[in-house]
Amino acid sequence: MQTKILLIEDNLEMRENTAEILELSGYKVETAENGKEGVEKAKSTLPDLIICDIMMPELDGYGVLYRLNKDTDTASIPFIFLSAKAEKTDVRKGMNMGADDYLTKPFEESDLINAIQSRLKKNEIVKKDFSKDEAGINSFLSEISGLDELKKIAENKKRKTFRKKDTIFYEGDSAQYLFFIAKGKVKTVRTNTDGKEFTSELYNQGDFLGYTTLLENCIYKDMATVLEDTEVLLIPKDDFLTLIYSNRDVAVKFIKMLTNSIQEKEEQMLNLAYNSVRKRVAEALVTLNNKYNTKNEEHFTINITREDLASIVGTATETVIRTLSEFKDDKFIDIQGRTITLLNLDKLKKMPY
């Protein structure tokens, strides 16, 4: 597929000449004659890379970058500033705002093409799908190290094994590591003022754990407990933060994860407030299926204590047991001991409020 580039430039001659250079180099080019039009085209076409002049009418280049960075759909698009201004303060301002590169007019054709190829190559690394296991994280870290941006993050990885019911970190602890779950399952639990536990998040093999606390620079607001024997890779806090601050692409990746986490928690809170217990138990079973049924089994089996399930649902254990019995009578699930087999996932998904 042909690589798309959006060129935002108010000078007609410069815009046409630069577009011609890019098209002759094999790129598909969209153009915009001012910043406002550029933002609209970036959001509608989602180009692979943006080249943007700084001094423009309607909206200058800094304003364009600011608006695109606020939108998760466009925040990760590589961004190159193009300007006749060469003062160091302008360069520093653009890079501090998240620009990936900076070219000064007039520029050599080779400099432009090299800058584009370099940024596209780096962006591909972050967009690349890595397997959600230790080999995947090693591959990811190796790719990052290959950019000569943070070699020690791969070198300093530590491994730790946790047994079922072990605690990885406690609420109120100071964060020292980013955790990568190489094997196993983990839950984070929050305790309310009455001392009741509520499961705030579930994690599976291939998930990162603890990045929210590192990015917010605060103490843990939850306790992380192991649901089954688990192996984690520990990435030191300083190495992770250095990677975030030095690599815009990786920063965007984790910020997106953080945004999704916040949205999921907001939806979870709304469900607790407004959904019936039957709906919440059904949604908990669906969530467990989505999280852990990696092989897409038709009748997925869940091995979970009723206390843990009640913690996810946010209700009493007795209420969960009664609701599960109703689901069994309705042929939605089967129960053998503490093992739950999902017989009709579609019915659980469509459970009325």
Image: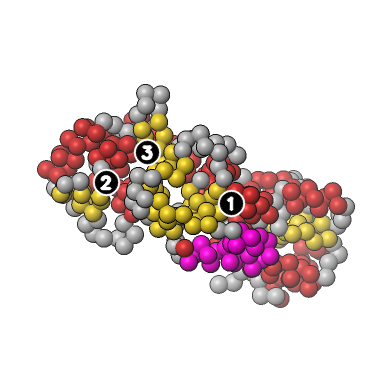
Q: Quadrant of residue 106?
A: bottom right
Rounded to the nearest whole Å, what is the CA distance between mark 3 and mark 2? 13 Å
Side (left or right) of 11 relative to 148: right
Instruction: Identify whether 224 is placed above or below 120.
Output: above
Most prominent secondary structure in the magenta stretch?
helix
Rounded to the nearest whole Å, what is the CA distance between mark 1 and mark 3? 26 Å
Identified by mark 1, the residue type is Pro
What residue did someone put label 3 on?
199
Q: Residues within 10 Å of mark 2 (few under 14, many from 20)?
A: few
Q: Position of residue 77 (x, y in %)?
A: 62, 57
Identified by mark 3, the residue type is Thr
Which residue lies most toward the left here? 329
Q: Is residue 147 magenta?
A: yes
Q: Quadrant of the C terminus?
A: top left
Please name whichever residue, 135 or 40, is drawn nearer the observer in this view of the structure.
Answer: 135
Q: Nearer the viewer, mark 1 or mark 3?
A: 1
Q: Quadrant of the N terminus?
A: bottom right
Please name whichever residue, 240 or 20, is drawn nearer the observer in this view of the structure.
Answer: 240
Q: Nearer the viewer, mark 1 or mark 2?
A: 1
Side (left or right) of 238 relative to 350: right
Instruction: Identify whether 340 is placed above or below 77.
Output: above
The magenta stretch is 135-155
| Badge 2 element | loop
Q: Quadrant of residue 58?
A: top right
What residue did someone put label 1 on?
236
What residue did someone put label 2 on?
304
Q: Residues within 10 Å of mark 3 (few under 14, many from 20)?
A: many
| Badge 1 element | strand
Q: Quadrant of residue 315?
A: top left
Which residue is rendered at x = 78% and y = 59% of the image?
102
